[in-house]
Image: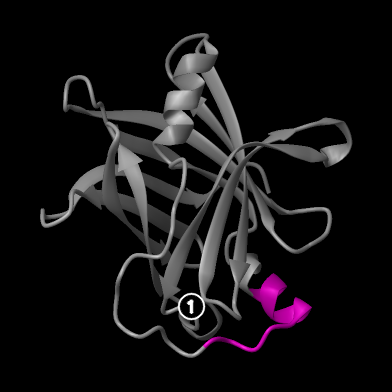
Amino acid sequence: MNSLFASYLLTAFVLTLGLPAAQAAPEPAIPVSTATGEALYSRFLGRWKGSLEYRDYSTNKRVTLPTLLDVSLSPDRKAMIWQFTYDDGPGKIVKGAERITIQPNANTWTEVEVEIKQGNTFSEVGGTQVYQLSNLNSLLQSARAVLLATGVGEESSKPVDVRKTLTVESDRFVLLKETRLQGMPFQFRNQYTFARNSANP
């Protein structure tokens, strides 16, 4: 699998740049502490099995790829490392990774594409994007948490609004990404659907 296709798959999840989009007044921030940060991340940690469904920009058709996801704490325990494995057919395996940081004091979700190295270290290889989060408290308070992450990005050299909806349960989570040109309705871009991978605890 060539690096161009790998980059395309990651672009389905990561835009070059994301900044908070205009929205209603943000909810009160959660007090910051290491314990709180790790509690937020605990909802995602572990091994997951599912799929990535994305819209092919060249044909406007939807494509589904079997996908594995391994989520662990970063060495400094201040972020998560999401490691993806995409199955694009016999002998076609694509891998990618991201460092994801939730900042309760600012209600933000930050993504950076990274490369995993020996010793579980990593280096940043892509741009940083920041989303404003709504309903962050639900990760600590609800068995079924629904978060909304909003920002701005670029598609086909045009600015777009980006909206991600994360639905998190104990054994399942879904991440839906939608985008829109200014003044237009949101359109589907991709969706990750995962269940906990009990075969690989």
Q: Residues within 10 Å of mark 1 (few under 14, many from 20)?
A: many
Could you say which is closer to the camera, residue 96 or residue 110? 110
Q: Is residue 33 above or below residue 50?
A: below
Q: Residue 58 location in percent, x, y?
A: 22, 20
Q: Residue at x 67, y 55 (%)?
A: 80
Number of on-image labels: 1
Residue, disc 1: 136
Q: Residue at x 39, y 54 (%)?
A: 175
- Asked if residue 193 lies left or right of residue 7, the reply is left
Q: Where is residue 118 drawn, in percent x and y?
A: 86, 31
Q: Position of residue 45 (x, y in %)?
A: 64, 58
**Which of 80 and 133 lies nearest the eye of the viewer?**
133
Q: Give the colour scheme of this rendering.
A: one colour
Q: Amino acid at mark 1?
A: Leu
Circle 1 — which element?
A: loop
| The magenta segment | 29-39
Residue drawn where x is 17% and y is 54% of the image: 182
Instruction: Say if the magenta span includes residue 13.
Output: no
Q: What residue is drawn where x is 51% and y is 86%?
A: 141
